[in-house]
């Protein structure tokens, strides 16, 4: 509902430091917005004034704000619609799995309870209950809490809930899971897997996908969506995970040799015929190849090819600093610290050669 008659006003005042700031006069009171006297500041001040008028109107005519009538599932749909613009399909699927794990039933998003004198959101109570009841492993629960944490933080930032969910408290309820060991592929395993795949007419090009992942650290969905237009003279351009920027991968001699072997079909821009939706059947083809080559899977899949690339970076380039390693791997420095640098280089080298 539009606000037709906006009461109140925006005025300009000079501060003690002789800077011009915007103030709002509303219902006989004057309050600083903290905004500068610029076009942007005036635009933001008008939004504040409009919101004040909407709240005043709702109070006067006893109109319930939309957020007080929405359920968790309805707001989650809004959340997904917004995030789909900047997140890949796997991340969206992670959000959905996290949501299903903690909210099996629907309820009003703004609902709260008073417990021991503290106001607690029903969102927090549901997550707490499901943490204590679920039979899932600590590691899986921690992943789901991270996923649902993005959603509940968004709810608070967008104004759908008045009380933030205390995620740090919920995380402490999850038993400390032992850190997962790094799992990689050694050179013999990679060659054996690729040989098995090349014997299968349907999945023979998957061997090239694997070789590119090992040589560049690309993720499986990045390889599957790779186009020849993105393959430049000295670099490969790929979209970042949040789809907000283009990341560059150097074309090494090893990468060039792999690209030269890949058959290029006329009028076809995609390097490989598959898409992200083919991930499940390609993973099954990988597992079959490992089985036929008598290679123990040990929980490994496509992502371990990227881990192999990062491990090789650290082992074979001992003079590289952590910034360069993270830059080449296209990941955060803390990921390198938490998952790789906690191991001595000799131990990582042993993994690659075992």
Image (cartoon, rainbow, N blue to C red):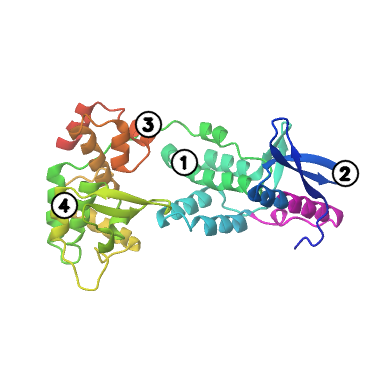
Q: Nearer the viewer, mark 3 or mark 2?
A: 2
* Name of the residue lying farthest toward the front: 18
Q: Mark 1 vs mark 4: which is more N-terminal?
A: 1
Q: CA distance from mark 3 to mark 1?
A: 13 Å
Image position, residue 63 (x, y; %): 80, 57
Residue 323's disc is none
Residue 141's disc is 1
Q: Which residue is mark 4?
A: 193
As helix, strand or loop, the secondary structure at mark 3 comes to loop
In the drawing, does residue 130 fall left or right of residue 31? left
Q: Nearer the viewer, mark 1 or mark 4?
A: 4
Q: Is residue 69 magenta?
A: yes
Q: Mark 1 vs mark 2: which is more N-terminal?
A: 2
Q: Which residue is mark 3?
A: 178
| Nearest the eye: 62 or 2 | 2
Q: Residue at coordinates 28% horizontally, 59% vertically from top-left?
A: 230
Q: Quadrant of residue 164?
A: top right
Q: Is residue 85 magenta?
A: no
As helix, strand or loop, the secondary structure at mark 4 comes to helix
Image position, residue 108 (x, y; %): 68, 53
Image position, residue 80 (x, y; %): 53, 57
Q: Residue at coordinates 62% horizontally, 41% vertically from top-left?
A: 125
Q: Please tell me how crowded label 1 is: few (under 14), some (14-19), or many (20+) other residues with Cα within 10 Å.
A: many
Q: Which residues are magenta?
A: 48-71
Q: Mark 3 vs mark 1: which is more N-terminal?
A: 1
As helix, strand or loop, the secondary structure at mark 1 comes to helix
Image position, residue 175 (x, y; %): 47, 32
Given contact means CB atoms under 8 Å apart, are the residues at marks 3 and 2 in contact? Answer: no
Residue 28's disc is 2
Q: Mark 3 vs mark 4: which is more N-terminal?
A: 3
């Amino acid at each position: 509902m539009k606000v037709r008659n906006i009461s109140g006003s925006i005025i300009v005042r000079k501060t003690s430091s002789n800077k011009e700031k915007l103030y709002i006069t509303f219902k006989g009171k004057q309050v600083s917005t903290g905004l500068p006297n610029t076009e942007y500041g005036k635009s933001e001040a008008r939004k504040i004034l409009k919101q004040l008028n909407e709240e005043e109107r709702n109070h006067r005519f006893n109109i319930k704000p939309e957020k007080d009538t929405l359920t968790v599932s309805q707001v989650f749909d809004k959340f997904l619609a917004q995030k789909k613009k900047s997140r890949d399909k796997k991340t969206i699927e992670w959000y959905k799995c996290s949501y299903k794990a903690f909210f099996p039933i629907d309820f009003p998003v703004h609902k709260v309870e008073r417990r021991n004198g503290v106001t607690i959101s029903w969102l927090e109570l549901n997550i707490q209950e499901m943490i204590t009841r679920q039979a899932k492993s600590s590691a899986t629960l921690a992943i789901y809490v991270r996923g649902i944490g993005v959603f509940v933080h968004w709810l608070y930032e967008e104004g759908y809930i008045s009380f933030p969910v205390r995620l740090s408290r919920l995380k402490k309820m999850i038993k400390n899971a032992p850190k997962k060991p790094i799992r990689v592929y050694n050179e013999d395993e990679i060659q054996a897997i690729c040989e098995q795949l090349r014997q299968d007419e349907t999945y023979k090009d998957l061997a090239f996908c694997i070789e590119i992942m090992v040589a560049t650290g690309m993720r499986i969905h990045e390889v599957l969506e790779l186009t020849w237009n993105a393959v430049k003279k000295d670099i490969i351009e790929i979209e970042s995970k949040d789809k907000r920027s283009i990341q560059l991968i150097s074309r090494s001699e090893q990468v060039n040799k792999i690209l030269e072997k890949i058959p290029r079909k006329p009028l076809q821009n995609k390097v490989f015929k598959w898409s992200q939706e083919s991930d499940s059947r390609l993973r099954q083809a990988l597992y079959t190849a490992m089985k036929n080559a008598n290679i123990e899977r040990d929980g490994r899949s496509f992502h371990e090819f990227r881990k192999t690339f990062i491990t090789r970076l650290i082992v074979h380039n001992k003079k590289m600093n952590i910034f360069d390693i993270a830059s080449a791997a296209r990941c955060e420095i803390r990921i390198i610290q938490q998952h790789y640098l906690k191991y001595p280089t000799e131990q990582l080298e042993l993994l690659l050669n075992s």
